[in-house]
Image: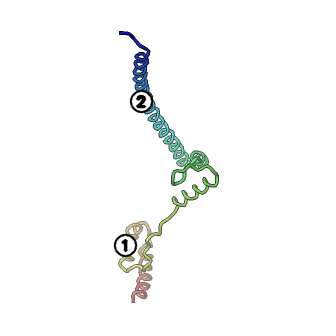
Amino acid sequence: MCVTPRMFSVGLYLFLRDELASLREQYRQLRKRIYRSMRRDRRLWADAIADQAQNAANMGNLKKMYNMTKNCRDKRGKLITTAEEQLERCREHFEEVFRTSATDIDSNPLSKIEVEKALRFLKKRQGACLENAKSRYTDRRRVTNTALGESMG
């Protein structure tokens, strides 16, 4: 059997094709390892910055905390680059943090039972310590009873 140039080029082609397939697989595996490593490193980096910022906040070092979080993102995840956007984001953040919801405070007058219950509680807590506690509470009771009597009917 005689080796022709055509056979040589087909054999070389098959060899190179197999070699190229194995190199592609190696490249794919290396790329996976690199991306995993990058994700892990990015997560560790972000956690380290968050820990440092939290420690600075706990110690009351607001300058360090601000410098740690200066390169921040908005609510949609977009990187904030200008100073105006950073100030706006800080304003939004602190508005959310310090926003107080309307509390449910009962503004109706107290009932007689609630007043008596509160006075009994105060007597138990402070009556043993004060000499004139009884006279003070009975005076208040008289005033409260007359005020309740007037408001109830």
Work out whether residue 61 can be spotted.
no
Q: Is residue 96 above or below residue 13?
A: below
Q: Which residue is found at the position 37% from the left and 72% from the top? A: 120
> Disc 1 or 2, which lies upstream in sequence?
2
Q: Residue furthest top?
A: 1
Could you say which is closer to the camera, residue 96 or residue 18?
18
Q: Is residue 65 above or below residue 151?
A: above
Left or right of residue 123, residue 67 in this image: right
Q: Is residue 124 above or below residue 1?
A: below
Q: Residue 115: horizontal and vertical position, in percent?
A: 39, 77
Q: Residue furthest right?
A: 83
State the quadrant of the N terminus.
top left
SS at mark 1? Answer: helix
| Amino acid type, mark 2 | Gln
Q: Residues within 10 Å of mark 1 (few under 14, many from 20)?
A: few
Q: How many marks?
A: 2
Work out whether residue 144 can be spotted.
yes
| Amino acid type, mark 1 | Arg
Residue marked by disc 2: 29
Alpha carbons under labels 1 and 2: distance apart: 77 Å
Q: Which residue is found at the position 42% from the left and 26% from the top? A: 26
Residue marked by disc 1: 120
Q: Residue 33: horizontal and vertical position, in percent?
A: 44, 31
